[in-house]
Amino acid sequence: AYGLALKGLEKTAVDINLLPPEHRRKAGRVGFYVMVGLVLLLFVSAAGWGAGSVARQRFYMKRLNHQIKALEPEVADVRRAQDKDKDLDKRIDYLNGIRGTRSALLDILKDLSNIIPKSAWISSFTFSEKGVELEGYADSASELIPLLEASPHFKDAVFRSAITKTREGKERFKIGLQVN
C-alpha cells in the first residue's frame, strides 16, 4: 500500500504490483473491441469516400453528356456553316482567278470571233474552270472542231451533244473545249 501511495504522488522507477494475482485487476477486452471497431469504421469511411468520389464523377459525366447532347444541333449548324464557307471560298478563289484572267478571257472571245465563220453564230458561251462550252448554229458544225483545234488558245474540242438540223437548214451544236 505504501508503494501504491507513492506511485500516485510521483513517478517511480519500478512498476511493482504487490497484490496477489487473485486480487489483481484483470485486463479488460473493452480496449481491444474499441480498437477493432475503430479499424472497421476506418475501412467503412474509406470505402464510402471512394464510392462517393466515383458517384460524383458519374454524376458529372452524366451532366456533361447531357450538355453535349443539347449542343449537338448547334455543332451541326456550325459544321454546315463551315461547309458553306468552304464552298464560298472556292467560288471566291475561282472568281478571283477569272478576274485575273479578264484579259485572257477577252483574248479567247476575240479568237473565237476570228475562228468561227460568218455563217455560224454562238447563242450561249460558258466559261468555267472545266473549260469553255459553246452552243450555237452553223451551216456545217463538223467544220468547227478542226478550226478550234488549230487555235493556240484551245485544245480537246469535242461535241457535247448530237448535231441537230433546224427548219432553217442550220445545224445546232454544243461544243466543249479546254483552254490552254
Image: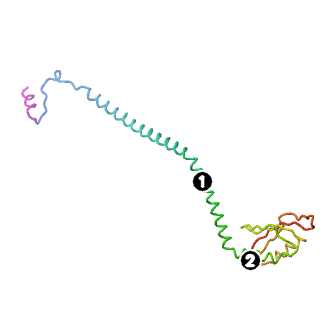
113 and 164: which is toward the camera: 113
Q: How many marks?
A: 2
Q: Residue at x 46, y 42 (%)?
A: 60
Q: At label 1, which amino acid type do we have?
A: Arg
Q: At label 2, which amino acid type do we have?
A: Asp
User: Which element carries disc 1, helix, strand or loop?
Assistant: helix
Residue count near mark 2 (Cα–Cα under 10 Å), binned few <14, some 14–19, many ≥20: few
118 and 32: which is toward the camera: 118
Residue 3 part of the magenta segment:
yes
Q: Which of the 4 quarters of the picture holds residue 32?
A: top left
Q: Residue at x 60, y 57 (%)?
A: 82
Residue named by callout 1: 79
Q: Mark 2 vs mark 1: which is more N-terminal?
A: 1
Residue named by callout 2: 107
The extreme front residue here reads 168
**Magenta region: which residues?**
1-11
Image location (x, y in percent) of residue 26: 21, 24
